[in-house]
Amino acid sequence: MNADLHLNAAATEISGAQPQWARAEAQAIYDLPFNDLLFRAQTVHRQNFDPNRVQLSRLLSIKTGGCPEDCGYCSQSSRHESGLKASKLMEVQRVLAEAKKAKDAGATRYCMGAAWRSPKERDMDAVVAMIEGVKDLGMETCMTLGMLDLGQAQRLKEAGLDYYNHNIDTSERYYNEIITTRTFADRLDTLANVRDSGIKVCCGGIVGMGEEKTDRVDMLMTLANLPEHPDSVPINMLIPIEGTPLGEADPIEPIEFVRTIALARIMMPKSHVRLSAGRTAMSDEMQALCFFAGANSIFVGDTLLTAENPGEDKDTALFRRLGIQPMERDAQ
Ligand code: SAM
Ligand code: DTB
Ligand code: SF4
């Protein structure tokens, strides 16, 4: 059988709505012979993007540690003994000084993260000032502050926020094994509030938390079957953090990780698929395969929020070897 022909009809158009993916089709694509999967992902990628351009985002932790949530992978939960020192919300001027440095280093999007369950009213003025200040620098803004109600999302939108990151992290089935303090449905509610306020959604998850491959497919199914595809889809490879429940998790097989990227590309053809956390532990060849499979965004800089990232020199060298150019702002 010609798998490609069969699978081209994968997503079903439901009158006017975006194509809905059926589970069996998605799983069949994930399980294709690797070369067929990569060929198909690269074909979709080329139909929608310049294959040699990758978008660069820069992260800053504006409020680190002491988080009341119990996400099993996270260094910042107050319930885990990761040894991380908690800090208060950064001052606005310091955030803007860091954003300026990121801009000078080539980042076009500035992502600010806070270890909160959700933002408190008393923090909103500072958060709004950060968004306005980073916008004035000419960068795109992204925030990840935990759960948002509609009013909070609207306030961030009015301040000029472009993107909000809130991940579903894994499949609905596996979710309770990883997080108990907020539900999968809570996450979908926040995503709806972000979407309804007109902010672009950045939503993805983590691979390598001991999940089954069916969980990886289900996670992508949930994302691809949202009312609109997220504009950005970060795929994180677990960074095992000592002192967290997942600190001793077995690493994911690289080929499985690449399959996840490829399926994300195929199911969400116009989304920016971000090769997110975990690049420090990946070989150049694995990253190259991820780019071939359709990843077209990365985080740059030495640190993510609290964990290591390859850093500018390594990424510049990798991009040179692969002939990859940073994506211009207007092309995003
Ligand atoms: N506190 C906010 C929240 O959870 O909504 C924002 C920050 S949180 C650190 C952002 C995302 O980073 C998480 O949802 C998770 O997907 C990812 N992440 C956190 N720790 C990670 C780790 N050790 N390895 C891989 N990804 C991680
Ligand atoms: C996302 O999906 N990955 C980023 C961003 N969204 C906020 C965070 C990765 C965090 C990695 C672990 C750390 O730095 O603590
Ligand atoms: Fe808190 Fe976010 Fe870490 Fe969960 S992922 S513990 S909500 S900082």
Image (cartoon, rainbow, N blue to C red):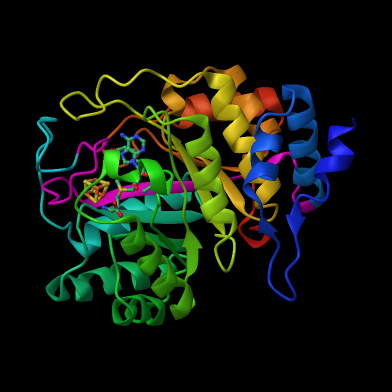
* Horizontal side of residue 29 vs 105, given as left or right: right
- What span is in magenta? 48-75
* Horizontal side of residue 149 vs 252, given as left or right: left
Q: Depth check: 265 or 27 in front?
A: 27
Q: Depth check: 261 or 154 in front?
A: 261
Residue 28 is drawn in which quadrant? top right
Residue 146 is drawn in which quadrant? bottom left
* Horizontal side of residue 46 vs 237, given as left or right: right
x and y, in percent, of residue 97 in the image? 30, 55
Residue 139 in sight here: no
Please give the count of numbered marks on the rendered protein: 0
> Which residue is located at x 14 percent, y 30 percent?
82
* Magenta run includes residue 52: yes
x and y, in percent, of residue 93 in the image? 23, 62
Residue 292 in sight here: yes
Using the image, determine if residue 268 lies above or below residue 246.
below
* Magenta run includes residue 16: no
* Horizontal side of residue 111 vs 108, given as left or right: left
Using the image, determine if residue 224 lies above or below residue 45.
below
Q: Quadrant of the C terminus?
A: bottom right
Q: Depth check: 302 or 206 in front?
A: 206
Q: Quadrant of the N terminus?
A: top right
> Which residue is located at x 74 percent, y 31 percent?
37
> Which residue is located at x 71 percent, y 37 percent?
29
x and y, in percent, of residue 230 in the image? 55, 59
Q: Depth check: 132 or 72 in front?
A: 72
Residue 7 is drawn in which quadrant? top right
